[in-house]
Image (cartoon, helix red, strand yellow):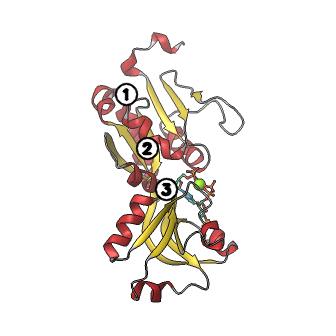
Amino acid sequence: MSTSTIPAKRQLILALSKGRIFEDTMPLLEAAGITVLENPETSRKLILDTNDPGVRVIIVRASDVPTYVQYGAADFGVAGKDVLLEHGGEGLYQPIDLKIASCRMSVAVNAGFDYETAVRQGARLRVATKFVQTAREHFAAKGVHVDLIKLYGSMELAPLVGLSDAIVDVVSTGSTLRANNLVEVETIMEISSRLVVNQAALKLKRERLQPILEAFERASSKQS
Ligand code: ADP
Ligand code: PRP
Ligand code: MG
């Protein structure tokens, strides 16, 4: 069936990022009876069909998921709490913690750097991170003065080459920190991915969205 025969209010677009979020969302979609027909790791297509002609998946950068959903270019999406805090959540309804892509947001430093003493002595710290809002709030709440350096990836490199004293990044197994001789000195918060829904779509497409949200809710609570 061509999508053009389906009324607009019955068509849904789901925004996902490639990698862990796409992979961890697949079982939740399956629980809602939806199978994605293409693999974003092998296809260059950015709009993927599913077995349901009324549901398509768009592949975007992880940090762009909230933006697509906020503006209604996607009706719903899956994004990490880290990404949502940086975005601000404007225009987004966040009904479900899917408990996927779990990690924590932490502060890490070179193994030889005495973070506690630097903080106690009121040193001004240079902190490299992709998560500037979260980092700013964390250090402001502690009363620590920081110069934030915005990076887009490979944060672990920054203290190794003297770009910063510390980093704020997500940590899961800790193996990236260990491989780079860094140590975790503070956990800022636990992170997992959330379902985000465009607020207008929630009202206008509720009939179509509701059963999918319920299936996601059931499947994610089983996982935890
Ligand atoms: P990006 O290209 O932005 O790094 P990822 O697919 O690596 O995108 O990360 C998507 C989300 O998964 C992040 O926003 C975060 O919530 C979570 N995440 C990132 N790294 C890890 C990890 N090592 N283990 C578990 N979850 C992670
Ligand atoms: C993430 C994150 C850390 C690493 C932490 O990187 O930015 O570097 O995972 O996980 P660990 O504690 O299990 O080592 P990712 O694998 O997403 O690579 P990329 O974002 O740089 O592509
Ligand atoms: Mg990553």
Q: How far apart, in angstroms, are the residues tagged by discs 1 and 2?
A: 14 Å
Graded by Cα atoms within 10 Å as few (under 14), some (14 to 19) or many (20 or more), the crowding at tag 1 reads some
Residue at the outermost left position: 203
Graded by Cα atoms within 10 Å as few (under 14), some (14 to 19) or many (20 or more), the crowding at tag 2 reads many
Say what amino acid the circle numbered 1 marks: Arg
Quarter of the picture holding the N terminus: top right
Pointer 2 residue Cβ closer than 8 Å to ligand 1: no
- Image mark count: 3
Residue at the outermost right position: 42
Q: Position of residue 220 (x, y in %)?
A: 45, 51
**Nearer to the camera, 100 or 124:** 124
Q: Are marks 1 and 2 in contact (CB under 8 Å)?
A: no
Horizontally, is 140 left or right of 190 in the view? left
Q: Which residue is mark 2?
A: 216
Horizontally, is 95 left or right of 53 in the view? left
**Nearer to the camera, 124 or 23:** 124
Q: How far apart, in angstroms, are the residues tagged by discs 3 and 2?
A: 11 Å
Helix, strand or loop under label 1: helix
Helix, strand or loop under label 3: helix
Q: Which residue is mark 1?
A: 208
- Residue 147 badge: none
Q: Closer to the N terminus: mark 1 or mark 3?
A: 1
Q: Position of residue 151 (x, y in %)?
A: 55, 57
Which quarter holds ligand 2? bottom right
Q: Is residue 68 above or below residue 143?
A: above
- Residue 223 badge: 3
Q: Closer to the N terminus: mark 3 or mark 2?
A: 2
Q: Is residue 107 above or below residue 82?
A: below
